[in-house]
Image: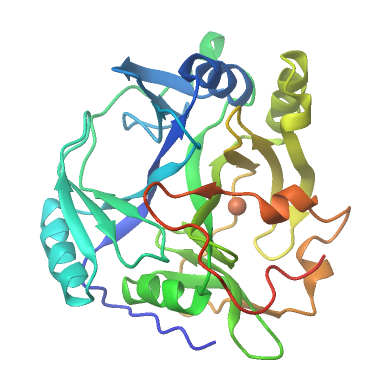
Amino acid sequence: MSINVTAQPPFNITRASHVCLTVRDLAASRHFYTEVLGLVVSSEENGVLYLRGIEEACHHSVILRQAQGEPSCDYIGMRVASPDDLTKAEAWVAGIGGRAERVTRPHQGPSLLVTIDPATPRVELCASMELVPRLLADYPLQKGGKALRLNHYQCVVPDVDRSAGHFGALGFRPSKFTTEIETGKVVSIFMHRKNDPHDLVLARGAGPRLHHFAFVVSDLQAMLRAADTASFYGYGRQVEHGVSRHGPPNGVFLYFRDPDGHRIEFILPPMQFMDPEEVPNAWDSTQGPSLIPWGDGPPQRWREEATPFSGLNSGAAYEGRWLPKI
Ligand SMILES: [Fe+2]
């Protein structure tokens, strides 16, 4: 693998933290996210819904913004350690020819919207966020899958080596990657800043697009309860893929599609991946079946459909094969 990872990044990103999506019917989305997934509403203001998992102590991890037109992702959010990191981020982005814009967001401290390049997911960096109560012990309030906390994003990009190179320069370490056996180019890569295998997964495809964002749930029963609740409310066909297991991160998963087609993954608490001497799992594009050790692979819609990023050309062409055929 040719992606360089620095141990001394120019500024300190700490974790995946919040995602902002557009939706066509905020009431329908509210119903799905609260009753099926089990997120809780932190606030609703001016056509924008702010949600969080029941374990989360910061105001929001999902922002749903009512808008006309094709549902899209405005940005994926990452926390930084301090406001000073945003100043350093501005200098780094300017140095690579990207665009960084200071933004004022409700319930957030200093924030910076970053477009690294047109073929890489747009990222909002956030230095602090308003605190709210954790609701882990508020049992009567917990519904559906009782989603605990946001864990990671998976995005499809036309050139994984290029986009992953940017995040490697920001200290994102790979925990797993798959290379195309004919060319040696990276087909997919799991990268992380916190102490588990993934904050950001990049996979080859027309993009940039958001393939899914993932929440941790407590156990299998929470996944099944969310699926049963989805069925009860008529969302049964939106339980898209799983329950099954990703091989390398030892992760059990279940995927849902929300009323606008945005994809949400539920995962069990992932393994720890933290110490600097740990080496990533390396796979090649002939090993697809090992990535899902039992059961069928994903349906075709899982392989092809994803959410475009607002204002970016999400159809940028790519060369070579996409995810290994499973
Ligand atoms: Fe995932």
Of the 4 image quadrants, the one containing the C terminus is: bottom right
Residue 291 x, y percent position in the rendering: 76, 65
**Which residue is rendered at x = 69% and y = 75% of the image?**
321
Residue 283, position as x, y percentages in the image: 69, 79
Residue 95 x, y percent position in the rendering: 17, 76
- At horizontal 38% and vertical 70% (from top left) the residue drawn is 167
* Image position of 278 with respect to 152: above or below: below
Is residue 20 visible in the rendered image? The answer is: yes
Query: Horizontal placement of 313 versus 265: left or right?
Result: left
Residue 55 lies, with reference to residue 271, above or below; the image says: above
Q: For residue 233, which quarter of the picture? A: top right
Front position in the image: 129 or 155: 155
Inspect this view and state whether residue 276 appears: no
Q: Is residue 47 left or right of residue 187?
A: left
State the residue lying farthest toward the right. 295
Residue at the top extreme of this rendering:
140
Task: Please give the name of the residue rendered at 49% of the width and 79% of the height, measured from the top-left corner.
Answer: 161
Task: Give whichever of 163, 175 is nearer the camera.
Answer: 163
